[in-house]
């Protein structure tokens, strides 16, 4: 029995007050369970509902690439500025200090280095995601032409089933390939299919008519940055994406291949969370770079 010394009977019940719970700002997540919401709240800032994810999972098919040669030197110093880290289990375990205290969106599929065979990626075990304390699991989904030979739809469903068992959100990563059309029709289709199949986050690309993609997808969309652009253009991309309905970015090359990666990620953060215009963001980038 608990120690009763100092026990005082409750007398104040606020009967006239309606019980209030903080708004949950992540799109489409109100009906999820506590564990899912807790993990989503680590990824998406509870005040803005937005996120800056730092993506450095490229090595899972490409090996060491520019900006990702030495994760300890090139990525670890940036981690403090990101809301969430997106990487593979191998890089997480080998190169990211376990005390950085950042949520992880774990790359959950793996496979061939042959780009045309990515559609046959397999999933890693959900126990691995639990061991890594993942806040989300990222799985590629490829819609349309290549789908006949693809197992990505099955992978997505399996990942969602596994994630739901343990309260771990799944991020559907809409695939793009050399042959694929990158327009609002394709991205809206792929994003919606991800959400309909249970993904609670979707990663896709910014495109002309992006509002169609975000408004028809019932869960938050984050955009990939794509190939390296001049810093101001990359900040414009972030600005347009969040102003046209994205909940943030999952950006890699435009950060770690920047001439000043730490300045760039802080500028991206300011555009996504603080509403800076691309011009203001670029000024901030230059100011930080020249410090
Ligand atoms: C692509 O499959 C990878 O998951 C990257 O994380 C993604 O493309 C984002 O990186 P980037 O901004 O360099 O395109």
Image (spheres, rainbow, N blue to C red):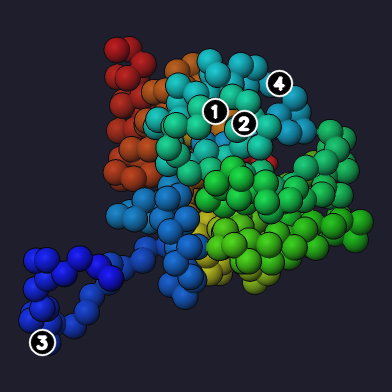
Is the C-beta separation of discs 2 and 1 under 8 Å? yes
Classed neighbour count for the residue bearing mark 1: other residues with Cα under 10 Å, few (<14), some (14–19), many (≥20): some
Is the C-beta separation of discs 2 and 3 under 8 Å? no
In the picture shown, does residue 181 fall above or below 144? above
Mark 2 or 3, closer to the camera: 2
Residue at 61% x, 55% y is 171
Classed neighbour count for the residue bearing mark 2: other residues with Cα under 10 Å, few (<14), some (14–19), many (≥20): few
Relative image position of residue 90 (x, y in whole percent)? 68, 32
Look at mark 3 in the image and give the residue it sits on. 16
Mark 4 or 2, closer to the camera: 2
Classed neighbour count for the residue bearing mark 3: other residues with Cα under 10 Å, few (<14), some (14–19), many (≥20): few
Label 1 or label 3, whichever comes before in sequence order? 3
Residue at 59% x, 24% y is 95
Q: Which mark is on residue 64?
A: 4
Label 4 or label 1, whichever comes before in sequence order? 4
Look at mark 1 in the image and give the residue it sits on. 96
In the rendered image, the quadrant that contains the C terminus is top left
Label 4 or label 3, whichever comes before in sequence order? 3
Judged left or right of residue 185, residue 45 is left
Q: CA distance from mark 4 to mark 1?
A: 16 Å
Mark 4 or 1, closer to the camera: 1
Q: Is mark 4 within 8 Å of ligand 1?
A: no
Q: CA distance from mark 1 to mark 3?
A: 50 Å
**Disc 3, SS:** loop
Q: Which mark is on residue 27?
A: none
**Disc 1, SS:** loop
Label 4 or label 2, whichever comes before in sequence order? 4
In the picture shown, does residue 135 fall above or below 284? below
In the picture shown, does residue 269 fall above or below 6? above
Relative image position of residue 71 (x, y in whole percent)? 59, 21
In the rendered image, the quadrant that contains the N terminus is bottom left
Pick the front one: 92 or 195 = 92
């Amino acid at each position: 029995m608990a120690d009763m010394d100092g026990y005082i009977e409750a007398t104040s019940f606020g009967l006239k007050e309606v019980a209030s719970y903080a708004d949950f700002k992540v799109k489409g997540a109100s009906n999820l369970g506590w564990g899912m919401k807790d993990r989503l709240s680590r990824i998406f800032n509870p005040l803005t509902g937005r996120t800056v994810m730092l993506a450095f999972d490229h090595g899972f098919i490409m090996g060491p690439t520019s900006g990702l040669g030495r994760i300890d030197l090139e990525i670890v110093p940036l981690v403090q500025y990101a809301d969430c880290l997106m990487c593979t289990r191998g890089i997480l375990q080998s190169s990211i200090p376990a005390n950085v205290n950042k949520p992880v969106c774990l790359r959950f599929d793996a496979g061939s280095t042959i780009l045309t065979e990515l559609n046959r990626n397999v999933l890693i075990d959900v126990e691995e995601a639990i061991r890594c304390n993942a806040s989300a699991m990222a799985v590629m989904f490829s819609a349309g032409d290549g789908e006949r030979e693809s197992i990505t739809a099955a992978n997505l469903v399996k990942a969602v089933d596994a994630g739901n068992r343990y309260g771990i959100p799944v991020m559907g990563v809409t695939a793009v390939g050399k042959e694929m059309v990158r327009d609002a029709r394709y991205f809206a289709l792929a994003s919606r299919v991800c959400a309909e199949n249970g993904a609670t986050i979707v990663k896709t690309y910014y495109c002309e008519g992006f509002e169609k993609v975000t408004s028809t997808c019932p869960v938050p969309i984050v955009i990939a940055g794509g190939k390296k652009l001049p810093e101001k253009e990359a900040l414009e991309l972030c600005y347009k994406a969040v102003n046209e309905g994205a909940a943030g970015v999952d950006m890699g090359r435009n950060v770690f291949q920047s001439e000043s990666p730490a300045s760039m990620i802080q500028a991206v953060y300011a555009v996504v969370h603080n509403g800076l215009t691309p011009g203001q963001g670029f000024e901030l980038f230059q100011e930080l770079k020249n410090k």
